[in-house]
Amino acid sequence: MRVGVLTGGGDCPGLNAVIRAVTKSLLRHGQCKGVQVLGIEDGFEGLMGGQPRTRVLRWDQVSGILHMGGTILGTSNSANPLRDAATLAQVQRNVRTLGLDVVVVIGGDGTMSLAHGLRQIGLACVGVPKTIDNDIALCERSFGFDTAVATVTDALRRVESTGNSHHRVMIVETMGRHAGWLALEAGLAGAADVILLPEIDYDLQAVAARCQQREKRQRYSIICIGEGAKPRGGSLTVREHVAHSPDPVRLGGVGHVLREQLQPHLQSEVRTTVLGHVQRGGDPTPFDRVLATRFGHHAAQLVIEGRLGRMVTLQDGRIGSVPIADVANTQRTVSLQHELIITARNIGVCLGD
Ligand code: F6P
């Protein structure tokens, strides 16, 4: 059996831990059954050209990478194997030439949608959910999220000392696309006074009122805002459009928009920090290393048992799997009834409404 492994979409702490667990589990099984693991380079891009880019993964190549951020295989968040009929036909030829029986696809919702689309050329996939956004349907925790929450929490604590010393309003913008999980969990962990999420359009007056209240007593405020947040009646802040990409808009900059809106209402200076890619980098936390290892091991079991077309999940703390079809083209956003939303409100955090 020949099994491909690729990492697609944005990088994320814990990808290498999955590659390691998938490969080691398959190779150990293969000692009696004969399995070869082929690493595909730069996500689906490695399968798209006239010359597929792959390398055989042996035990030694995946040893010593558990703790490393990024991905040893490289990734791409613009490669689209479904772009047109010619691209798809080339992918099909490459899959045949390489003799791939199945590909373990480690990625976010965009990557899962592509994996689902590839069934039309008969390519069987097993999915492993990754994203710092934690927005993959039917999966309560994707690896990478815990590390990103730790990074943002640390940043919030750091800007607090400047806010406190200079009596400023400090805005910290997080990633997370159209889901507010990262801003919400890090905002709670970093004791933000205001947390603004894509799921709740913010009322500028409510945010200004909270900062004015704090101007009189504490004399500084910390606002944590997800990049997908928007003002009531306003629109998303788009950094750039990307043609032909499965993810056609890049968000970013709403923290600056909020600063402009808020400043005229306040005496204190308002400053913005956009955290950007530091949230995706660095070594995975122990939690993410273990979760990624569990996911990778389970993906290998699905391959061995021939349960293809499924994505590994974590639900109610248990590892399981669901059909990739059920998660393709959907996202898991924060429900307004979620316990963390209720908790935030009840401890007096302003959610902008
Ligand atoms: O999906 C992960 C993510 O980091 C999002 O939070 C963010 O909007 C996007 O990727 C950024 O992608 P890029 O690296 O292409 O700017």
Image (tube, helix red, strand yellow):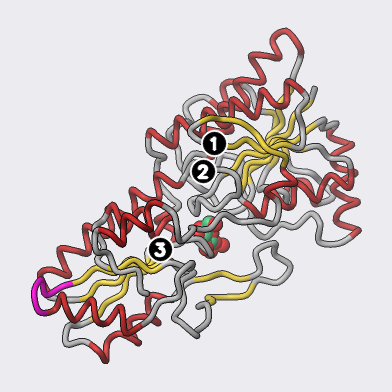
Element marked by disc 1:
strand
| Main secondary structure along the magenta-highlighted residues | loop
- Tell me: residue 118, above or below residue 321: below
How far apart in space, not on screen, are marks 3 and 2 (Cα)? 20 Å
Q: Which residue is mark 1?
A: 314
Q: Which residue is mark 2?
A: 140
Which label sits on residue 33?
Answer: none
Residue 245 drawn at (x, y percent): 70, 64
How far apart in space, not on screen, are marks 3 and 1 (Cα)? 24 Å
Q: Earlier in the sequence, mark 1 or mark 2?
A: 2
- In this view, the residue in front, 198 or 67, is 198
Residue 64 drawn at (x, y percent): 47, 27
Q: Residues within 10 Å of mark 1 (few under 14, many from 20)?
A: some
**Residue found 15% across the figure and 75% down from its top:** 214
Looking at the picture, which amino acid does disc 1 mark?
Answer: Leu
Element marked by disc 3:
strand
**Residue found 23% across the figure and 76% down from its top:** 210
Cβ–Cβ below 8 Å for labels 1 and 2? yes
Q: Residues within 10 Å of mark 3 (few under 14, many from 20)?
A: many
Q: Earlier in the sequence, mark 3 or mark 1?
A: 3
Q: Which residue is mark 3?
A: 174
How far apart in space, not on screen, are marks 1 and 2 (Cα)? 6 Å
- Tell me: residue 231, above or below residue 283: below
Q: Magenta segment range?
A: 216-220
